[in-house]
Image (tube, helix red, strand yellow):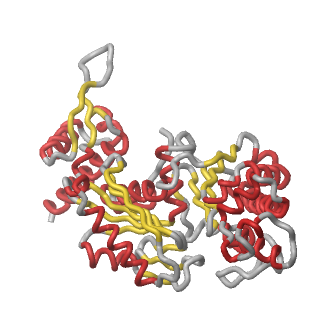
Amino acid sequence: MPRKKNNSVRSYYKALVKNLIRTDGPISRIALNKLTGMRLASVTDVTKELLKEDFIKEIGFECSKRGRRKVLLDINRDAGRVATLDFNSNRILGLGADLKLGINYRSRRIIPNNSDKDKIIQIMKDILYEIIESPSVKIAPVLGIGVADPGIVDENAGISILATQMKGWENVPIKDIMESEFGCPTFLESDTRCRLIAEKHLGAGKMKNDILMVELSSGIGAGIMSEGRLFRGSRGSAGELGHMMILENGPYCNCGSRGCLEAIASSKAIIRKLQEAIKSGAASSLSKVCRGDISKIDINMISQATEDGDKLSLQIIEETGRFIGEAIANSINLLNPEIVILTGDLLAFGDYILNPIRGMVRRQALSYNTKDVGIVIAEVGEEAAAIGMAAVVLDEVFGIPELRHQREYRVR
């Protein structure tokens, strides 16, 4: 029994050292000794094992004017690969990534209209096979699969609970489906949280620990980081900003309530409002653009119409910005973030939507809470959720299970 305990302790410290080299490398053995509290001899033994396994490599020396120069250790980015998906009601994006979040393969497919749940799952599988079998990914073992989900998720069970913008998408056991198909550990996370992680690693959130990220697309959601840790809530559904009630007795939302932000300010809501206004006789250049068939109106047409000065489009986008600004102001008062990062299709409207958002935040949020709080546009781009999901998979694969919900992305 004592031997088993010693093996368990050794495994714990090996995982700890491995993960620190992955997240904080390049790093010296002395620094690992200080961060872990392990004896230097133990650190040396563990790193010797990791070098033998080809998981890490020595990459040179630490710059120092005094004493013996310290050898620096870093992960071998080609010791493994991860495959990730990001999906919504329109498309599925897939990535293959190495252990330093370098992208090795990309795939993107449009979801055909009226695709049911089974069809979408099959497209997901096809993309994953494409990634895993690609030459740039096949050179290393695939350590995990990750799926960034547009709705409410149970990340522990790996179940997609509900995506309100996708018809019939409820209680989908993503983890079980993919693990059965590929025999590979599979993880699920909210796409907005994944975008937040990507921005924290690579974009607008780099030097921040308290972040509110707001996704503005066909669905609306938020990712929350508090003191460098993701905030999920007791059941993993924190951040459902799209279901904050903004307009009393407003239109019905797919969730069953009325006046939700998503029902009045998502891209689908904007299209619906323009169609209804034109149908009721309101003048708009979009009538000519779609040749009288208002069912053809899409968000790109509306974006161009605002640029061209179409009064109806400008009015609806300005109103949409105010609704979004009200929800963000409420969130700032509640969460007191350092920064608000905006992402999603609606940012194509530029200042036409950003100015009313920022104006409403200035009016509605407490001035003390908004002091020095920037409302900025995300920097990572369309692949952000898939990249952030790759970071989640690596944390799951190399992290320490006991510390799973204490993982930090803090500025050090």
| Frontmost residue, 87 versus 200 | 87
Q: Quadrant of residue 281?
A: bottom right
On screen, residue 373 above or below 269: above
Q: Is residue 201 above or below residue 181?
A: above
404 or 264: nearer the viewer:
264
Task: Please provide percent x and percent y for residue 142.
Answer: 25, 60
* Position of residue 178 measured from the top left corner of the image (x, y, whole percent): 32, 75
52 relative position to 353: left or right: left
Tell me what residue is drawn at x 31 percent, y 14 percent: 66
When asked about the image quadrant of residue 68, the answer is: top left
Residue 318 shown left or right of residue 221 in the figure? right
In this rendered view, identify the residue nearer to me: 247 or 367.
Answer: 247
Q: Is residue 216 visible?
A: yes
| Residue 23 x %, y % | 36, 45
In the picture, residue 47 is in which quadrant?
A: top left
Q: How far across and down, in percent of the image, does residue 77 sit?
A: 27, 45
In the image, what residue occupies the spot 83% across and 76% down?
Answer: 248
Q: Where's the N terminus, which quadrant?
A: bottom left
Q: How many marks?
A: 0
Residue 177 sits above or below residue 350 on the image: below
The residue nearer to you, when weighing 238 against 193, is 193
Which residue occupies the extreme top position in the image?
A: 65
Q: Is residue 320 left or right of residue 103?
A: right
- Which residue shows up at 14% across the image and 48% down it? 53
Q: Is residue 242 visible?
A: no
